[in-house]
Image (cartoon, coloured by chain):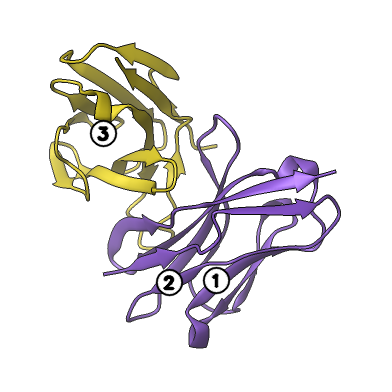
Amino acid sequence: AQSVTQPDIHITVSEGASLELRCNYSYGATPYLFWYVQSPGQGLQLLLKYFSGDTLVQGIKGFEAEFKRSQSSFNLRKPSVHWSDAAEYFCAVGARGFQKLVFGTGTRLLVSP
Amino acid sequence: DVKVTQSSRYLVKRTGEKVFLECVQDMDHENMFWYRQDPGLGLRLIYFSYDVKMKEKGDIPEGYSVSREKKERFSLILESASTNQTSMYLCASSATDGLTYEQYFGPGTRLTVT
């Protein structure tokens, strides 16, 4: 069975600084990996996804993530954070042939002026 | 754009009431999901449906049931609401095309049981 760990519950970043949110997964085969963002009071919106191919994937809002099989990680990055990026971020893992996704517990990003 | 709508954004119910949460998607997706979101616990799958009248239990089905009579609609039912079911409920849908597995989410229903 798949599992996802997001080790950071909260992260505070200054506006304009770079961001990296960590995600580690557990799955025996090649996983499908997702990052979602949830703004306050909203549902989840897909930022980016990895299925195969290039291990560096680009998403919306200037985010990117890198799949590292050797580290079982799929960390989310952004070079310069904007105040509007303050939200909760969820990593999720899926598998070929299975429609269900397993979500991490989320990381809440706070952006300081 | 894919649209997933949920019948209520906020709902307040009393202990013991029967509660219906409705979800509708407009993209002809085969799969629909109900999640519960609690602080520190992330999203936990309650039930999943992969076709009309088909359902599968998720990780926390106790105290819940579901109904899917039409492809676009997936209902979550709390037969007798309890205070420990106070939570945010999220509905999602996805296509069975073997290509994406991406789930599209509704805005959520924040349920308070008093």
The N terminus of chain A sits in image quarter: bottom left
The residue where tag 3 is placed is: B71
Q: Name the residue: 33% across, 40% down.
A: B35
Q: Are marks 1 and 2 in contact (CB under 8 Å)?
A: yes
For marks 1 and 2 on the same chain, the one whose residue lies earlier in the sequence: 2
The reply to whether residue B74 is in sight is no
The residue where tag 1 is placed is: A74
Give the amino acid type for the residue marked by disc 1 in the picture.
Phe
Helix, strand or loop status at disc 3: loop
Give the amino acid type for the residue marked by disc 2 in the picture.
Tyr
Which chain did the image draw in purple? A
Which chain did the image draw in yellow? B
Write down the chain letter for disc 1. Answer: A
Measured in 3D between alpha carbons, the distance from the residue under mark 1 to the one under mark 2, in whole angstroms, is: 8 Å
Horizontal placement of A2 versus A105: left or right? left
Write down the chain letter for disc 3. Answer: B
Quadrant in the picture for residue B29? top left
The x and y percentages for residue A44 are: 51, 42
The x and y percentages for residue A69 are: 49, 84
Measured in 3D between alpha carbons, the distance from the residue under mark 3 to the one under mark 2, in whole angstroms, is: 32 Å
The residue where tag 2 is placed is: A25
Write down the chain letter for disc 2. Answer: A
